[in-house]
Image (tube, rainbow, N blue to C red):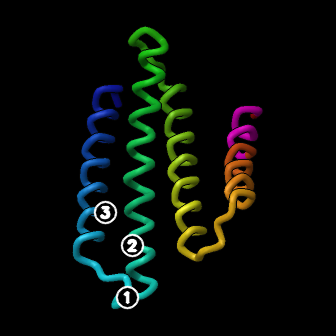
Amino acid sequence: MTLKLYLWGMRVSVFLSLLAWGAVVCFIDPEKTGIFGQVLFYLTLFLSLSGTFILFLTWARRKARGGEIAFVHLGISFRQGLLLGLLAVLLLVLQHFQVLTWWDGLLVIAGIFLVELYFLSR
């Protein structure tokens, strides 16, 4: 798989996940659907945010390296994009249950940071 094909696949995936998230926001009532609607909302939001972060981090690494990027950097961008998407969704879930305070947010950030440090140290 070439880099160009990978990036176009990611762009299409992000576009489709943004459409799905928009459809969930517009057409699904969380009070009527219950937990299913909420899970669908958070899942589509996670996919949208993760894909956006992956594309942004790939673009930033490509700019920092002068236009070239290796597939090793794609893996790092993919992992970090997923972790950033997970971070955003976890913070929103905590806010949804009204248990988000600044120290809980810092604990979630520290947990995501420790996971990233684990992968960087291997």
Q: Quadrant of residue 97?
A: bottom right
Q: From the top left corner, tell me how far across and down residue 40 is, in percent.
A: 39, 72
Q: Nearer the viewer, residue 113 or 107?
A: 107
Whether residue 52 is situated above or below residue 108 in the rendered picture: above
- Residue 31, labelled with which disc? 1
Q: Quadrant of the N terminus?
A: top left
- Residue 21, labelled with which disc? 3
How far apart in space, not on screen, are marks 1 and 2 (Cα)? 13 Å
Amino acid of disc 3 = Trp
The local crowd at label 2, few if under 14, some if 14 to 19, many if 20 or more residues have their Cα within 10 Å, is some
Q: Quadrant of residue 98?
A: bottom right
Q: From the top left corner, tell me how far across and down residue 65 is, in percent.
A: 48, 12
Whether residue 101 is situated above or below residue 15 in the rendered picture: below
Amino acid of disc 1 = Glu
Q: From the top left corner, tell me how far across and down residue 45 is, in percent.
A: 40, 60
Judging by the rendered image, the residue that carries numbered circle 2 is 40
Query: Which residue is at 32% across, 33% downward?
Result: 7
- Ranked by sequence position, the earlier of labels 1 and 2 is 1
Query: Which residue is at 74% across, 55% downward?
Result: 107
Mark 2: secondary structure: helix
Whether residue 22 is situated above or below residue 74 in the rendered picture: below
Amino acid of disc 2 = Leu
Mark 3: secondary structure: helix
* Residue occupying the far front of the picture: 102
* Residue occupying the far top of the picture: 66
How far apart in space, not on screen, are marks 3 and 1 (Cα)? 17 Å
- Residue 77, labelled with which disc? none
